């Protein structure tokens, strides 16, 4: 496993791998790795000849400078974890390799980025779309791997991949969960033990709505109410949003038809905002 810091070096390795017709898999991360990231790496290892993981805490996707400062950084620990997973390259650039002086270009995916997470985190997805475009352009992988927990990020990245003509497959890996069902996230570490235990209410509520859907409920407002009622039984939970949207366009759905549809939620426990979702009408 080699750790690469320079964009130029990553670029020439990627070029060499293409010449050798190796299938290149890419897992972008911001480090602070947990089992959710490792599931992406495992999937990538199974499908690809070469596995590249990036670790870059992207400043442009943070709304609050304190969040960026507080973001956990431990490249040694992350690299130790990845070495157990047969990763070939870690790309860990400094900020000025990604955003050189005078950097003035950004990628904005119109229409998908103002709702849901975008509403409480203005500019967040512009930062994500910009850095992912830069990373894709450097590495030009055949497959890139993202977790379903960040459903809006997945929709944004799939759209930019199509719109900008990147020739690659976006592979979406199911959400990895703690034993309680709580979706894995680096934010879980910041919950108190009690909050962490009680946060399982989120997936319980989503599963209750999914069951109602399976039994024939097609009305989005009734499904929303099921999620709301269940989460409200937990006094520590504060609902930010519960939205039923098309999985691809993220447009709200009133009556669920045959399309893949998300029930997406954001719920705060104290200062920590958690997101999760379930898919209705999953096609694959
Ligand atoms: O999901 C993340 O960790 C980040 O948003 C990503 C995709 C690595 C871009 O910085």
Image: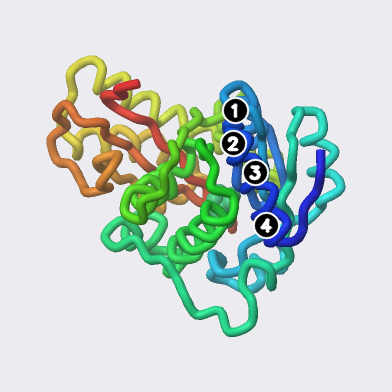
Disc 4 or 3, which lies upstream in sequence?
4
Residues at marks 3 and 1, CA–CA distance in whole angstroms: 30 Å
- Which of the two marks, 4 or 3, is nearer to us in this view? 4
3 and 1 marks in contact (CB < 8 Å): no
Q: Position of residue 187 (x, y in %)?
A: 63, 48
Q: Name which of mark 1 and mark 2 comes first in the sequence.
A: 2
Task: Find out if the beta carbon at label 1 lies less than 8 Å from the nearest ligand 1 atom.
Answer: no
Q: Earlier in the sequence, mark 1 or mark 4?
A: 1
Above or below, 49 against 59 in this view is: above
Q: Residues within 10 Å of mark 2 (few under 14, many from 20)?
A: many
Rendering colour mode? rainbow
Looking at the image, is mark 4 or mark 2 nearer the viewer? 2
Foreground residue among 72 and 248: 248
Q: Determine whether, in the image, residue 177 is placed left or right of residue 232.
A: right
Q: Viewer-nearest of labels 3 and 1?
A: 1
Secondary element under disc 2, as helix, strand or loop, is strand
Q: Residue at x 26, y 17 (%)?
A: 214
Please rate how many residues cluster around mark 4, counting C-alpha atoms within 10 Å: few if below 14, some from 14 to 19, many from 20: some
**Do the residues under discs 1 and 2 have CB atoms within 8 angstroms?**
yes
Q: Quadrant of residue 193?
A: top right
Which residue is painted at 74% across and 34% down in the image?
87
- The answer to whether mark 4 is within 8 Å of ligand 1 is yes
Residue found 46% across the figure and 75% down from its top: 105
Residue at mark 3: 188
Label 4 SS: loop
């Amino acid at each position: 496993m080699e750790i690469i810091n320079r964009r130029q070096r990553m670029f020439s390795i990627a070029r060499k791998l293409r010449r050798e017709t190796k299938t290149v898999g890419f897992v972008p991360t911001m480090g602070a790795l947990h089992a959710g990231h490792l599931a992406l790496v495992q999937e990538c290892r199974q499908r690809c000849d070469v596995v590249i993981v990036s670790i870059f805490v992207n400043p442009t996707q943070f709304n609050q400078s304190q969040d960026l400062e507080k973001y956990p950084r431990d490249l040694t620990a992350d690299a130790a974890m990845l070495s157990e997973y047969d990763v070939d390259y870690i790309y860990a650039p400094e900020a000025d390799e990604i955003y050189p002086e005078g950097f003035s270009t950004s990628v904005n995916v119109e229409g998908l980025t103002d709702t849901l997470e975008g509403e409480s985190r203005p500019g967040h997805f512009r930062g994500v779309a910009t850095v992912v475009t830069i990373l894709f352009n450097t590495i030009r992988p055949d497959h890139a791997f993202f977790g379903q927990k960040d459903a809006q990020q997945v929709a944004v990245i799939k759209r930019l991949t199509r719109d900008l003509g990147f020739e690659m497959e976006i592979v979406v890996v199911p959400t990895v969960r703690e034993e309680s069902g709580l979706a894995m996230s680096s934010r879980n570490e910041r919950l108190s033990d009690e909050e962490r235990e009680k946060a399982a209410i989120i997936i319980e509520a989503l599963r209750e709505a999914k069951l109602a859907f399976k039994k024939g409920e097609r009305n989005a407002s009734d499904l929303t109410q099921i999620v709301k009622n269940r989460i409200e039984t937990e006094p520590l939970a504060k609902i930010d949003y519960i939205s039923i949207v098309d999985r691809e366009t993220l447009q709200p759905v009133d009556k669920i038809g045959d399309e893949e549809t998300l029930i997406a939620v954001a719920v705060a426990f104290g200062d920590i905002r958690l997101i999760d979702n379930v898919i209705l009408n999953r096609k694959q």
